[in-house]
Image (tube, grey):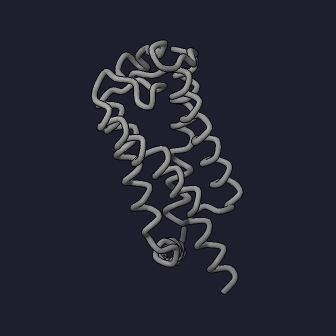
Amino acid sequence: MEREATRARNTSAARAYLSVWGPVLIVLGVGSLIVNPDFGVGDHVSHDRLFGRFETNGWHGLAGGLAGVAAVCSAATRLHVRAVAIGVALLGGIIPAAIFLASGDGSAALGIIPVDVADAITLHLVPGLVGLACVAIPDALTARRASGHVRARRRQGS
């Protein structure tokens, strides 16, 4: 029974989400800080384009990088995986997407983060929804699938 619980923790969809999305957030955060390390506020918000597509600045990069580090640490240590996945999905995904979309393309959300709709949808809304979907998948389901996969491989002689 304990072995099954360990397998469930190791194969949870929430952990997979953090393991995949965390490093992406770190790359995006570091890239944003390289492209535009400015931390201006209000009328002094500047922006440059990351990968020639997404408007970003120091605040945006810092937030993404920190969220990525939290995701990777949680996935690696298996501590508070569901809570961190919910936090990353909501605080780094759904809520910023809503704020960005409400602020409008070309504006500065909360007076610090440059907004572009492509960023709001592809790098916030979609990953946030995926994260919440991963959290909603019961660990027992992913554990059963993983153990079924192992049993099937054993029968095949692998």
- Single out the residue that lies furthest toward the front: 42
Q: In terms of depth relative to the viewer, which is nearer, 103 or 5? A: 103
Q: Position of residue 96 (x, y in %)?
A: 42, 41
Q: Residue, x 51% and y 28% (percent of image)?
A: 60
Figure check: 111 above or below 72: above
> Image check: 95 left or right of 6?
left
- x and y percentages locating residue 72 in the rendered image: 63, 47
Counting from the top left corner in percent of width and height, residue 32 is at 52, 22
Image quarter in which the C terminus is found: bottom right
Point 52% across, 73% down: residue? 139
Tell me the residue at 39%/61% (across/down): 133
Is residue 77 in view?
A: yes
Say if 143 sits above or below 59 in the image.
below
Residue 153 appears in the rendering: no
Total number of numbered labels? 0
100 or 82: nearer the viewer? 100
Q: Quadrant of the N terminus?
A: bottom right
Q: Is residue 61 above or below residue 7?
A: above
For this orientation, the residue located farthest to the bottom is 1
Look at 62% across and 38% down and name the residue there: 66
The answer to whether 73 appears left or right of 34 in the picture is right
Q: Position of residue 65 (x, y in %)?
A: 59, 34
> Where 139 falls versus 16 (above or below)?
below
